[in-house]
Amino acid sequence: MSTNNPTANQETHFFGDVCKNFDHAAQFTKHDAGLLDQIKSCNSVYRFRFPIRKGNGFEVIDAWRVEHSHHQSPTKGGIRYSEMVNEDEVMALAALMTYKCAIVNVPFGGAKGGIKINPKNYTVGELENITRRYTVELIKKNFIGPSIDVPAPDYGSGEREMSWIADTYATMNPGQLDALGAVTGKPIALHGIAGRREATGRGVAIAVRECVSVAEDMDKLGLTTGLSGKKIIVQGLGNVGYYSAKFLSEFGALIVGICEFEGAVYNEDGLDVEAVFQHRKSSGSILGYAGAKQEFKNTMEGLEQPCDILVPAALENQITEANIRNIKAKIIAEGANGPTSPEAEAIFYQNGGMIIPDMYANAGGVTVSYFEWLKNLSHVAFGRMNRRFEENSNLNLVNMVEGITGIALTPIQRATIVKGASELELVNSGLEDTMIRSYHEIREIYKSNPDIGTLRNAAMVGAINKIAVSYQNLGVWP
Ligand code: NAD
């Protein structure tokens, strides 16, 4: 176990930035300093190392799991596979998970994991060994379980890794009925849930749509309401970026720029997101896409092109004092965790911009992970028990209305009205409801006191108040 002091880690200051945001927001709450300290601190920081076989020898892997807050159980958060990962980052991401869950009323504490590797440097077999051994290390210290701590995918990990974790956990806990609830983001065939893969990006798109629907705020920004024709640049074409771009364009926006690791492409008339994605998949690079009018080898230049909305969906610390003044967007919607530094945020607001903060904007993933966990604990797919009943009730109603009015519906109208909801429809509906309600909850707090100043502070104020109530109700034992 290692230090919980944000200033003790000199590698980065991401946790310090999250704490700075917390301290600022805490001024607008009425809780005593001790309780605020308890909410802010990372409760458990587990740092470990383990060997794997590589070639003819061994390699030692650095890894972490941080449980930030136990005001709700289990704790929840993704596992990042990245050679850049470090303790400060995992602590920051775990803290953000706590606030995120509170904001969208998901009853979990926050957690996060990290494995310090570049997955591209390992074979699939080696990645499986690393993932299984990581899971066993968590089991040994009681840092994983459906009622303890539930990992999910993050940067560099996905359904495949979650399957290995689920299988390892189930194997090590024979007969445990709820074992598959120990991890979310699993493939559907392994008791995952429809809609999880695209949930974070769908949530980002709904958050942006909701934000631009408020006339009062758009007037201040000098934008019209609605997504139709809004020009958007997305950074990162991974899980969050790809699905954010896909759903934003389905909602009527123009994706004018896409930035990836190797460069950026831009077309003010709009890019075909799917075509860019397929081009990158087949050629290995976003550059060279025929539908682009401009391309930039320096990917950061892509962020500075003309647009209304910028969606950073790659990594933290992408928008800083160094480039914020060159950003043309009026709205930044944070798909990634921590993409904007506090200093850059202050400048952006001073210049009349608005930021939809990460801890709300990308909460779609954990929301649907919550639905997956519920599905795993109840051992039944959503809609299975009531779909046919609903269809029969709808059919009776349609027959009755047709009988009374003497008007017969077309077969298509009939089928649309009668059809019961599928799991995907229920998941998407629950996600949409969560994102819309939470946005307005945050905005109400933002509007309630001009000194709060940013949507991030407002979101944090709401989160602190909810977590404080949990801690006050729980009391302190002994
Ligand atoms: P991912 O690994 O699927 O995709 C990340 C993409 O970003 C990759 O395509 C990568 O090449 C690209 N990238 C890396 N560095 C870049 C750079 N400098 N410029 C442009 N592109 C770059 O990861 P993801 O799951 O999409 O996660 C992205 C971010 O979203 C992370 O901050 C993560 O913590 C956050 N997030 C993810 C989820 C989720 O459900 N996956 C949920 C909430 C938040």
Image: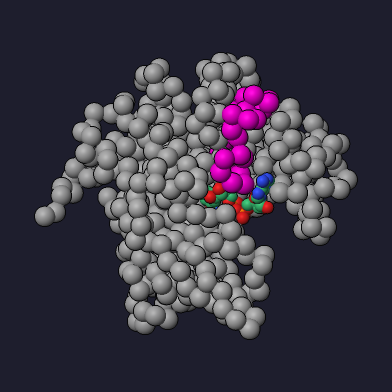
| In the image: residue 332, left or right of residue 404 | right
Q: Position of residue 186 (x, y in %)?
A: 52, 66
In the displayed orientation, state which residue is furthest to the right: 290
Which image quarter is the N terminus in?
A: bottom left
| Closest to the observer, 257 or 204 | 257
Residue 449 x, y percent position in the rendering: 36, 19
Most foreground residue, 332 or 202: 332
Q: Determine which quarter of the picture holds residue 468.
A: top left
Residue drawn at 86 percent across, 42 percent down:
291
- Residue 241 position in % (x across, y down): 64, 47
Drawn side of residue 249 relative to residue 10, left or right: right
Camera sees residue 48: yes
Residue 397 appearing in the image: no
Q: Residue furthest left?
A: 478
Q: Which range is magenta?
A: 312-335
298 to 86, vertically: above or below: above
Q: How many marks?
A: 0
Nearer to the camera, 113 or 331: 113
Queried whether the magenta region covers residue 321, the answer comes back as yes
Residue 95 highlighted magenta (yes or no): no
Image quadrant in which the C terminus is located: bottom left
Rendered image coloring scheme: one colour
Q: Front-most of 81 and 333?
A: 81
- Residue 126, x across and y down, in percent: 60, 75
Query: Residue at left 15%, top 49%?
Result: 476
Q: Residue at x 59, y 58 (%)?
A: 83
Q: Quadrant of residue 111?
A: bottom left
Name which residue lies at 34% across and 50% down: 4
Look at the magenta stretch and give its main secondary structure: loop
The relative height of residue 380 versus residue 7 in the rendered view (above or below) is below
